Image (cartoon, rainbow, N blue to C red):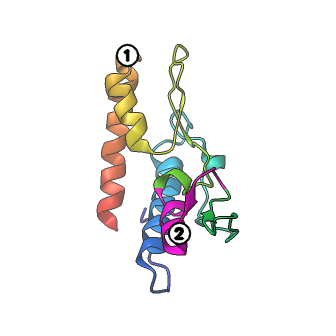
């Protein structure tokens, strides 16, 4: 099965990259992790968040998703379209270990790093690694 096209019509490359990663996340969660062991599908969005352009007293742009502030609108846009906020600031990736104290992650790579170095059960790392091989196959189609 081929994933959907991910190149949106438009000139903003950064928006295209965020849109692409959201589509890959959706495809991965549906086809590589159908039982939802590593991904909470409901937290993945296909549309990147659009920042509100409120400014504080110092004329800095305020992020509507976290407390950060920026000097320029471009800096705010880069921040809002970063992997941290690509799913509206939610953390769709989860550690399946019941003993885990840090169970939620912004990205699949953060979850992988956690499973490799966090002391969680080794079999989860192996299982996720096999699913990441499936993800690499998906990304290769793009």
**Residue to which mark 1 is pinned:** 119
> From where the camera sits, is residue 5 visible?
no
Residue furthest toward the top?
A: 99
Q: Position of residue 11 (x, y in %)?
A: 45, 86
User: Eyeballing the image, is 36 above or below 124?
Assistant: below
| Quadrant position of residue 65 | bottom right
**In what quadrant of the picture does the N terminus appear?**
bottom left
> From where the camera sits, is residue 71 visible?
yes
Magenta residues, start to end: 65-82
Kindly identify the residue that appears in the image at 38 percent across and 26 percent down.
115
**Residue to which mark 2 is pinned:** 77
| Quadrant position of residue 128 | top left
Residue 77 highlighted magenta (yes or no) = yes
Residue 12 highlighted magenta (yes or no) = no
Kindly identify the residue that appears in the image at 57 percent across and 42 percent down.
91
Query: Circle 2 sits in a helix, a strand or a loop, which is it?
Result: helix
User: Eyeballing the image, is 135 above or below 3?
Assistant: above
Count of numbered badges drawn on the protein = 2
């Amino acid at each position: 099965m081929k994933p959907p096209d991910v190149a949106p019509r438009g000139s903003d490359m950064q928006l295209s990259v965020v849109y692409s990663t959201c589509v890959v996340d959706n495809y991965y969660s549906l086809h590589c992790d159908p039982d939802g062991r590593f991904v909470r599908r409901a937290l993945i969005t296909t549309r990147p968040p659009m920042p509100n352009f409120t400014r504080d007293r110092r004329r800095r742009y305020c992020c509507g998703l976290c407390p950060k502030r920026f000097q320029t609108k471009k800096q705010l846009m880069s921040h809002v379209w970063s992997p941290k906020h690509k799913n509206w600031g939610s953390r769709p990736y989860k550690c399946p270990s019941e003993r885990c104290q840090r169970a939620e992650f912004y990205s699949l790579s953060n979850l992988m790093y956690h499973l490799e170095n966090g002391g969680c059960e080794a079999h989860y790392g192996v299982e996720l690694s096999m699913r990441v091989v499936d993800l690499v196959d998906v990304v290769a189609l793009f």
